[in-house]
Amino acid sequence: MDLQKEFESAVAKSKQLPEQSNENLLKLYSLYKQATEGDVNIEKPANMFDFKGIAKHNAWEALKGISKEEAMKRYIQAVQDFAK
């Protein structure tokens, strides 16, 4: 199976994972965004009380420079780990 198909399968499986911690959800979110869009391409939320938005932005920004392929591999591995 090629990487894109494995990634799409992992995305589908991620929706069926048991409830996850916020940390795990941020990891999946940031890896997904890096895999599908590349480096962060949006401004950090200006509202300092938008804790969720800021956390998501920071998690994605932390992956800056990682290739889309590497992000896909890490996403697939994370879904497998979280399913255990």
Image: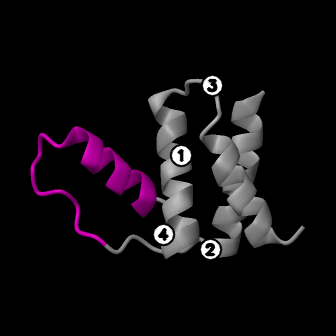
CB atoms at circles 1 and 4 under 8 Å apart?
Answer: no
- Per the model, the C-alpha gap separating discs 2 and 4 is 10 Å
Q: Nearer the viewer, mark 2 or mark 4?
A: 2
What amino acid type should be assigned to the residue bearing mark 3? Pro
Residue occupied by mark 2: 68
Mark 3: secondary structure: loop
Against 10, residue 80 (above or below) is above
What amino acid type should be assigned to the residue bearing mark 1? Lys
Residue 49 belongs to magenta span: yes
Residue 27 - label: 1
Mark 4: secondary structure: loop
CB atoms at circles 2 and 1 under 8 Å apart?
Answer: no
Crowd tier of the residue under label 3, counting other residues whose Cα lies within 10 Å: few below 14, some 14–19, many 20 or above? few
User: How far across and down, in percent of the image, does residue 58 sit?
Assistant: 36, 54
Magenta-drawn segment? 42-61
User: How far across and down, in percent of the image, does residue 52 sit?
Assistant: 28, 41
- Per the model, the C-alpha gap separating discs 1 and 3 is 15 Å
Picture quadrant where residue 39 is located: bottom left
Residue occupied by mark 4: 64
Residue occupied by mark 3: 18
What amino acid type should be assigned to the residue bearing mark 2? Lys
- Per the model, the C-alpha gap separating discs 1 and 4 is 14 Å
Q: Residue at x 68, y 63 (%)?
A: 72
Against 54, residue 42 (above or below) is below
What amino acid type should be assigned to the residue bearing mark 4? Lys
The quarter of the rendered structure image containing the C terminus is: top right
Q: Please indicate whether residue 14 sits to the left or right of residue 48 in the image.
A: right
